[in-house]
Amino acid sequence: METLKDLVRGVKVDSQAAVLLTSAACGVGALLMVVRTVSEHRAVKNKIQRARSRRTESLQRAEQEVLRYKQSHPSCDSAAILSLSLSELTKQLREGSLCPEDVFYSYMQKALAVHKELNCCTEILLESFDQLRTTGSNKDGLLYGVPISIKDNVSYKNYDCTCGIIMNLSQPAKKDSVIVEVLKKQGAIPFTKTNLPQALLNYDCSNPIFGQTVNPCNPQKTSGGSSGGEGALIGGGGSILGIGSDVGGSIRIPASFCGICGFKPTTGRLSLQGIVPIYRGQKCVLSSPGPMARDVDSLALCMQALLCDHMFSLDPTVPPLPFNLQTYQSSKPLRIGYFEHDGYTQPPPSMVRGLREVKALLEQAGHTVVPYEPLRVSQAVNEFIVKGVFADGAATMLQKLKGGPLDPCLKPQIVLYSIPTWLKRILVFLLTPFSTRVPPILSALCGVSSPAEVWEQHAAVEDYISDTIAHWRKCNIDVLLCPMIGPAFNFLYCGKLTCLSSLTMIYNLLNFPAGAVPVSTVTAQDEEDLKHLKGLYQDTWEKMHKEAVSGAEGLPVAVQCVALPWQDELCLRFMKEVEQLVKHKKN
């Protein structure tokens, strides 16, 4: 009996010790987790601080260089240089009436001033000062002596392509992108990298590393995105030509918001080597690099410079199709398709008015404008675009953001993406009787479930492209005039209104070249008409859309010009036609 009591007492002691040991282990584990979390947060903060310090240092170095040059060259007429178009600038540089140094330092000085106002540059490319000294070796280049800005995700050797995410910091590019190499060969001088939104897939322009870029026409508005740093810098006069990238309107939207021109070529026309996406492997909705500038001739000259033997040699996957100057300069009357909304997104009154005014100008100039109705836009948005971009249920996107702070402009999207798949399916069922647009988006965000479904989706996309081209042919049109997203949004609305990208993203899906051209500004009457706009669905998104674009009087209004794949020169020619007709009307 005594032995049994001793055994029970021993078990009790052992149990108490086990509880104490377990508690201690849990406490140590929790402490280690806290220490690890704090350590990770500190490491993230340090990474961000180092990136900001590098930017500050590069800006200060550039300021010192500009001051030194200006003091030793007091006759440099920066105002005159900054007033020149790209065509005029390249002509004077070739003739020798302007020297590359005066041009470079004039734009560097202006870029630094614009950045202070708009927060648009992520880093000054200090190698540009060295390149300036050797630029005379490329005097025959089409862009000889022209300072050029490039978006953050365009690779430049020894500089990060952050894409606005912490994971990409301190990962400098090992070599220049093909586009940067070709630009340098053509005599251009890339001199700064520009800001973008966190993780790229957003049309605002803010990230936790470099902050919010604001609009050059109104600092209370966003510059748009994802090439928003380019839009702001060029719109503010700090760059004459820039390179952006576009996977859903990322060149065209900031062009629209900032009152400049932007062109998304057919994907494959320009090299994508060294253009860094947020994640690779997504093949439904295609990205393309492209030029941004103050006028269409600048876009065309940039395309002409890039579409050269040097690019075709560096990247043999690019078809060796030089720029067709004859098509761009043609004056043949066009047959133009036209629509004011796509059945999914209703543009605000200012954007519709701009379209109607351009339509009237085109008809007066002898062109034929006919109605055009886009095919099955709701299906394209849900089944092809959203499900295509987030085929993995947004898992890769969420993984890329792990461990870093989330920017407020992206938060509404991430909240939606983070909902577990089972809960998304339940919400689809519950919301279907009450909402037309939200349930299909939630369903699409569940992604695809098997390789067979991926193939099925890709086949459906191919069929959609074929059907659209057949419809285009049936309408017998050369080009398309259609709405752009705009005017510039108030802050923190872009992430809540990704649905509006139906107006732009569909041309990435179709792989049609498309561009934005400014044609007007928002009037007081437009603002009044906005108050009474009912929209197509009368849902929450349309209510938020009205809030997003309110208070826009005086801001730019743009239209979108579109052509069939590989007819990039025709698209640019149409953009030029619109630009010229609007200009003549103002004069």
Image (cartoon, grey):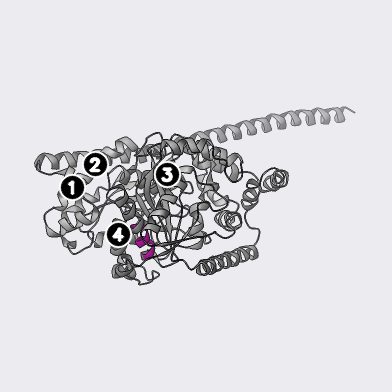
Callout 3 secondary element: loop
Look at mark 4 in the image and give the residue it sits on: 302
Residue 33 is a magenta residue: no
The residue positioned 74% from the left and 28% from the top of the image is 16
Quadrant of the image for the N terminus?
A: top right
Residue 503 place in picture, x, y as percent: 50, 52
Q: Dots 3 and 1: beta carbons under 8 Å?
A: no
> Looking at the image, is 15 positioned above or below residue 72?
above
* Distance from Cα at disc 3 to Cα at disc 1: 27 Å
Look at mark 2 in the image and give the residue it sits on: 110
Tell me which numbered mark, 2 or 4, is placed earlier along the sequence: 2
- Whether residue 570 can be seen here: yes
* Distance from Cα at disc 4 to Cα at disc 3: 22 Å
Tell me which numbered mark, 3 or 1, is placed earlier along the sequence: 1
Q: Dots 2 and 4: beta carbons under 8 Å?
A: no
Look at mark 1 in the image and give the residue it sits on: 81
Q: Dot 4 surroundings within 10 Å: few (below 14), some, or many (20 or more)?
A: many
* Distance from Cα at disc 2 to Cα at disc 4: 21 Å
Amino acid of disc 3:
Gly
* Distance from Cα at disc 3 to Cα at disc 2: 21 Å
Tell me which numbered mark, 3 or 2, is placed earlier along the sequence: 2
> Looking at the image, is 234 positioned above or below residue 367?
above
* Distance from Cα at disc 1 to Cα at disc 2: 11 Å
The residue positioned 29% from the left and 56% from the top of the image is 298
Look at mark 3 in the image and give the residue it sits on: 224
- Whether residue 491 can be seen here: no
